[in-house]
Amino acid sequence: MVKGRGREIPPLVIVAWTQSVAASAWLVFFAVSAASFTRPGRAWPAVVASTVLVIGMGSLLARASARGDISIVGPVFALSPVFTVVPDFLLSGTAPSLLGWLGLALAVAGTFSLAGGSAGATLRAVFARRDAVDALGAAVLLGFLAAVDRWGALVMGPASYLLCSHGLTAVVTMGLAAVLVPHGLGASVRPAQLTTVVAHGLLGVTGTAMQTSALTIAPAAYVNAIRRMSGLFAVVLGGALFRETDVGRRLLAAVLACAGAACLLLAR
C-alpha cells in the first residue's frame, strides 16, 4: 500500500498517522468494552523506548517500501528475529534452542541471498542497495522493539501497553512532522493521501495487536519470526503488482527465510 499510493508522503508523516490511528483504535476499544486500563507504573521505560524505536523503524521501513523494491524490502525486514535474541534474553531470560538457532541461520541465508541478487549472498551485496540498507536498519530496530514490547505487555497487558505506546509515539511524531515536514503533514489531509495513511494505520494496528498478544505467551524471537513470514507475500506482490524483476530467485530465497521462521516456531 505504501509503495502503491504513498510515495509522495514523507515517511515521518506516515509513521505519525499510523500511530495516531492505532492510538485512536485502542481508545475506542476501551470506550466500548469492559476492559480496564492498567497504568504504566514500572513499564514507563518500555513505553518510552518503544516510541524511540518505532519512530526510527517506521521511518526507515516507510522510506524503503515507498521508494524501493518491496520483494527485497519485505524479506530483508524478515531478518529482525536475529536481532531479537539478545535483548529478549536480557529482558526475559529466554533464548533459542538448537532448532531455533538453525532457524535463525536459515533466515539469515535466505535474506542475504534475496538481497544479493546475481552477486550472491554477501553483505556487500546487501549494502549496495539503499532500500535493503533501510530495511536492514528497520529489522535491527524491530528486533529490539519486539523484546521491549514483550516486557511491557507482560507488565501492563497488551491493550493498555499498546494504548500508551501508540499514544506517546503519535504525539511525538505529529510534533516532529509539524516542525520538520509541515507541508507534507498538511498535504496528508487531502482525501487521497488521508485514505492511504488511515488504511495503512488500520492494517498496522491489527497486526500489532495480534503480535503483542502473542508476545505474552511465547519468546519474542519466535513470534517475530513467524510474523516476518510476510516477506514471502511481499515477493509475490512485488512481482504481480509492480512487475519487479528476478522474482523466481527472490521467491526461492524468501522460502528459505520462511523455513527458518518455521524452525523457530517448532523450536519453542
Image: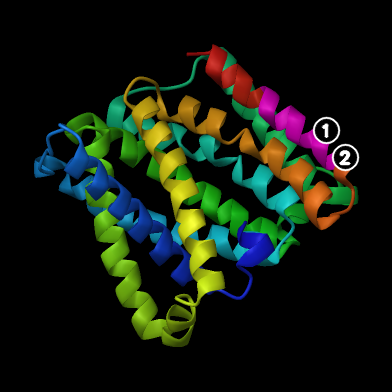
Is residue 126 visible to the viewer in this orientation of the structure? yes
Helix, strand or loop status at disc 2: helix
> Would you say the residues marked 2 and 1 are in contact, meaning their CB atoms lie under 8 Å apart?
yes
Q: Give the range drawn in magenta.
A: 248-259
Quarter-wise, where is residue 234 in the image?
Answer: top right
* Dot 1 crowding, Cα within 10 Å, few <14, some 14–19, many 20+: some
Q: Residue at left 43%, top 79%?
A: 185
Is residue 123 visible to the viewer in this orientation of the structure? no
Q: Check disc 2 and give the amino acid type.
A: Arg
Q: Is the magenta stretch mostly helix, strand or loop?
A: helix
The stretch drawn in magenta includes residue 251? yes
In the rendering, at what x and y percent does residue 125 appear? 78, 54
In the rendering, at what x and y percent does residue 257 appear? 69, 31
Q: Which mark is residue 249?
A: 2
Name the residue carrying label 1.
252
Q: Which colour scheme is used?
A: rainbow
* Front position in the image: 266 or 183: 183
Marks 2 and 1, how far apart at CA:
5 Å
Left or right: where 83 falls relative to 124: left
Q: Check disc 1 and give the amino acid type.
A: Leu
* Front position in the image: 130 or 250: 250
Give the total number of marks visible in the rendering.
2
Helix, strand or loop status at disc 1: helix
What is the quadrant of the N terminus in the image?
Answer: bottom right
Q: Residue at left 22%, top 32%?
A: 157
Q: In the displayed structure, would residue 91 be above or below residue 97?
A: below
